[in-house]
Amino acid sequence: MVEYKVKDLGLAGEGRLKIDWAEHHMPVLMLLRKQYSVEKPFEGLRIGAVLHVTKETAVLVKTLKDSGAEVFLAASNPLSTQDDVAAALVEYGINVFAWRGESSEEYYWCIRRVAESKPDIILDDGGDLHALLHSEYPDIADRLIGGTEETTTGVIRLKALERDGLLKYPAIAVNNAYTKYLFDNRYGTGQSTFDGILRATNVLIAGKVVVVAGYGWVGRGIALRARGLGARRVIVTEVDPIRALEAVFDGFEVMPMGKAAEIGDIFITATGNKAVIRGEHMVKMKDGAILANAGHFNVEVWIPDLEKMAESKRVIRPNVTEYKLKDGRRLYLLAEGRLVNLVAAEGHPSEVMDMSFANQFLAVKYLYDNRGKLPPKVFNPPREIDERIARLKLKAMGVEIDELTPEQREYLKSWRLGT
Ligand code: NRN
């Protein structure tokens, strides 16, 4: 008997079409499903997941279910759920508690359903489930085989739990797999962020001044795509001198937000930190400046300052709130400051989530195969998982590479052979 709370089961038909589309663009995960739906390694296992409920996540959780697991799923953001996909997953036998537009009480109600399902292994995106289990369900956290974490923000929170000696189970930082962050964070977010901005505003990027706060893998991808879409200037702001230097040598302008605020047309935050764009910056902004966030939580554009400065506000387009300031200037906040790619668009394309979620699947298998043997620490995914996914992806793309000759293998191992 499937437990669920979704917007409308009647949307399952549309959801199935979206999932079919995603499955056709996720060859690596489908290969894993082909193998493990026969072997059924997760027979009898209860898996709790807090992820963005999208067509790509559907492919992952269907694969986990086909591999024998019972899956409980809640959304890792109150606004990112694709309701038709959620309906199709219930129809498929997944226990889903997710709908677009959850209040924060409802958001936590859904995550609690997953926590209280007594999972053996959990998957998280952003760390809210890890934090909730440690703070309010210690008995469930104690019996967990382990957990995974999808994104940079969540890994930072897991590391903090480990540093404070509180982490109760082994955790795999899926975000840190090469085949995750080099592709998902950089190329996925680079494209999906502009997908969200364009669907929400339909503005022309060409000729505009785009300001990117944060030059991590996400910021690198966004700056790259801003350049590709013809932005007149791409300005990066940073606090880390090394990343700032890299941005300079990558050909982007670098300056403090206090200066960028005066010239930017479109501001995109990707720092994982709070209050990156504050009132002191907003007061300097041009009439019509657009504020968007690509980070996990809605704290990077400091909304309380915007609310304080505004004389009035209105939703001028779906996912676009117009804040009218006392001097008549208007600032536009996208997606209520939440991650614009998943709220105003569909998140990253399936091709890149194919690798991220192949990492999630194989991380779950690694935790299960090594149950009881791993200490309560944060681990990067084993190198062999990364390489297996890269090889499968190359094969799926019809790309062949060279093999080391025995002499080369010997050469790389020896210190004697030189010039
Ligand atoms: N389409 C998507 N489905 C998607 N796009 C980005 N993400 C998605 N999750 C499910 C996540 C990325 O892996 C959001 C996370 O914050 C990021 O690490």
Image (cartoon, rainbow, N blue to C red):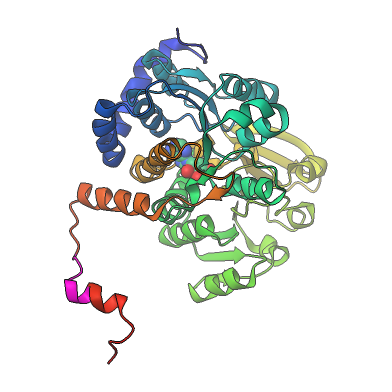
Query: Which residue is found at the position 68% from the left and 45% from the top?
Result: 161
Residue lying furthest bottom: 419
Q: Position of residue 119 (x, y in %)?
A: 53, 24
Horizontal and vertical percent position of residue 225: 44, 57
Magenta-drawn stretch contains 243: no
Q: In this image, 346 relative to 277: left or right?
A: left
Q: Quadrant of the N terminus?
A: top left
Q: In the rendering, at what x and y percent does residue 311 appear?
A: 80, 39
- Name above or below for residue 81 compared with residue 10: below
The foreground one among 229 and 353 is 353
Identity of the residue furthest to the top in this view: 1
Task: Pick whichever, 177 or 99, lies toward us.
Answer: 177
User: In this view of the protein, can residue 175 be seen by the observer?
Assistant: yes
Left or right, 12 with respect to 402, comes to right
Specify the quadrant of the image occupied by residue 118: top right
Region in magenta: 402-408
Please indicate whether residue 197 sits to the left or right of residue 269 in the image: left
Q: Residue at x 44, y 11 (%)?
A: 9
Q: Is residue 406 magenta?
A: yes
The one nearer the camera, 68 or 190, is 68
Which residue is pictured at 59% across the width and 29% down the height? Answer: 143
Left or right, 355 with reference to 312: left
378 and 329: which is toward the camera: 378
Q: State the residue at coordinates (35%, 40%).
A: 350
State whether residue 201 appears in this view: no
**Where does residue 259 sit, x and y in percent of width and height?**
70, 67
Instruction: Identify the residue at the far front of this view.
Output: 373
Quadrant of the rendering where the C terminus is positioned: bottom left
